[in-house]
């Protein structure tokens, strides 16, 4: 997750466990191609608005923003991780090794056309997923009607959002509750640096997580300066019990052994002594 700040290299700023969590938690890659299209669904009430695919296109969504010129937006793709990397390759430019958005759209549309053979209805639907250029100064050039973004190469982003791998909940727990170290009476533990952002939260990828961790960090700052006051019941982010949920409290091997012991005891109880 951390790319440019180098916080994890300074033990005086972050605890070793927090630094490890920041370095190891998985951040997903993501790519999106949006095109301006004609609002074709106004032609019929039962026109589908979404298409899910099993090839590299993956999924298409149509969005209506209420434009008065009869146009709307279609995400001809919105993908994550390995699929995002593959699609970048479809749009790779031989000139600067960047992504040519027009080339990427054309390659994705060519993949989409392979579905047109399945039914006339599907072929007609796919025919609408083309950039709308009417009224453009260059009607033959639809580059202005295509928008491409991938977050893994964007400065200060270096990825779309945290998407924890199985078993990484403990990392999230460690990062999320790091702000509780704030204590003016314990300068050794309170480094004065409190991390925040959606990637720190359990609800990564949503503004809710960013707001929640931001409030927690603000509460930590006030606590560190001795100016935080709780609500009427004395509650604040600083009174949360970080150990309320304990991820993986029992090793898998111990759990398996306990299960086998319980199963053996149950067998004896059912069969009776000497009947095993």
Image (spheres, rainbow, N blue to C red):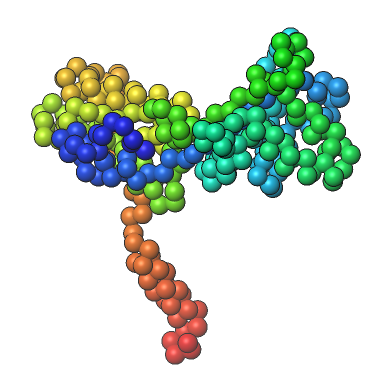
**Along the horizontal axis of the image, is 84 left or right of 2?**
right
**Rendered location of residue 11, percent (x, y):** 17, 39
**Along the horizontal axis of the image, is 144 left or right of 206?**
right
For the point 25% across and 38% down, which residue is it? 8
**Rendered location of residue 196, percent (x, y):** 33, 28
User: Is 82 rendered above or below residue 219?
Assistant: below
For the point 47% across and 40% down, which residue is it? 28
**Rendered location of residue 105, percent (x, y):** 67, 32
Residue 103: tell me if it is visible. yes
Which quadrant would residue 126 be assigned to in this image?
A: top right
The quadrant in which the N terminus is found is top left
**Rendered location of residue 232, percent (x, y):** 30, 18
**Along the horizontal axis of the image, is 36 left or right of 259?**
right
Q: Nearer the viewer, residue 12 or 4?
A: 4
Which quadrant would residue 88 be assigned to in this image?
A: top right
Residue 204: tell me if it is visible. no
**Along the horizontal axis of the image, is 15 left or right of 258?**
left
- Give the farthest residue toward the bottom: 274
């Amino acid at each position: 997750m951390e790319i440019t700040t180098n916080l994890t290299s300074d033990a005086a700023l972050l605890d070793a466990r927090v630094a490890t969590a920041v370095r190891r938690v998985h951040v997903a890659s993501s790519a999106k191609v949006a095109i301006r299209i004609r609002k074709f669904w106004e032609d019929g009430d039962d026109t589908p608005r979404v298409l899910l695919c099993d090839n590299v296109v993956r999924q298409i969504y149509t969005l209506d923003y209420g434009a008065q010129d009869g146009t709307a937006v279609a995400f001809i793709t919105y993908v994550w991780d390995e699929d995002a990397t593959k699609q970048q390759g479809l749009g790779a430019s031989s000139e600067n090794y960047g992504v040519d958005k027009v080339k990427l759209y054309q390659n994705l549309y060519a993949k989409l056309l392979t579905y047109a053979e399945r039914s006339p209805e599907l072929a007609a639907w796919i025919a609408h997923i083309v950039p709308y250029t009417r009224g453009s100064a260059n009607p033959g050039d639809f580059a202005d009607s295509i928008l491409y973004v991938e977050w893994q190469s964007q400065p200060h982003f270096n990825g779309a959002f945290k998407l924890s791998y199985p078993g990484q909940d403990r990392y999230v727990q460690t990062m999320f509750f790091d702000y509780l170290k704030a204590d003016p009476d314990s300068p050794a533990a309170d480094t004065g640096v409190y991390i925040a952002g959606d990637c720190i939260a359990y609800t990564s990828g949503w503004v809710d997580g960013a707001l929640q961790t931001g409030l927690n960090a603000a509460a930590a700052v006030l606590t560190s300066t001795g100016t935080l006051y709780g609500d009427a019941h004395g509650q604040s982010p600083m009174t949360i019990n970080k150990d309320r949920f304990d991820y993986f409290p029992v090793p898998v091997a111990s759990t398996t052994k306990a299960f086998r012991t319980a199963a053996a005891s149950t067998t004896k109880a059912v069969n009776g002594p000497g009947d095993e």
